[in-house]
Amino acid sequence: MKFDTKIWHPNISSVTGAICLDILKNEWTPALTIRTALISLQALLCAAEPDDPQDAEVARMYKTDMNLFNFTAAQWTQNYAKIVTEDDKVAKL
């Protein structure tokens, strides 16, 4: 499991989208369901673990300059996760 859309988060690689979540690596068992994985991912997105980062640069910013972190995360959301409407597609043509 990884993100295809770029995301600015300490536990997700800003380059590859790889997710640093224990149940996806060393704590995984066949008994875990997709639902369990998605709930765990949702919890990670809501409560970052900067002391166990996937992306050290993002974690450093998260720990030292929360205003810059929030600004950068908002910029990445705007740049990479923007919803494209039919009107946007038509205007682009």
Image: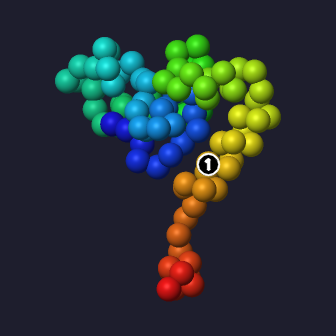
* Residue 18 location (% of width, % of height): 40, 33
Residue under label 1 = 76
Quarter the N terminus occupies: top left
Q: Residue 48: percent from the left, percent from the top? A: 59, 25
Asked if residue 36 lies left or right of residue 60, the reply is left
Residue 10: horizontal and vertical position, in percent?
Answer: 57, 27
Is residue 7 in view from this perspective? yes
At 58% from the left and 38% from the top, the residue drawn is 8
Which amino acid type is shown beneath numbered disc 1? Trp
Is residue 38 in view from this perspective?
Answer: no
At mark 1, the secondary structure is helix
Say which quarter of the image contains residue 72. Answer: top right
Structural crowding at the residue carrying mark 1, measured as other residues with C-alpha within 10 Å and reported as few (<14), some (14–19) or many (≥20): some
Q: Residue at x 37, y 38 (%)?
A: 2
In the rendered image, the vertical position of residue 67 relative to residue 78, given as above or below: above
Left or right of 57, for residue 52: left
Vertical placement of 50 versus 88: above or below?
A: above
Q: How is the protein colored in the picture?
A: rainbow
Q: Which of the two residues, 83 or 91, is positioned nearer the viewer here?
A: 91
| Residue at the image point whose x is 48% and y is 24% from the top | 54
Labels in figure, total: 1
Tell whether 41 sits left or right of 73: left
Residue 93 on image: x %, y %? 50, 86
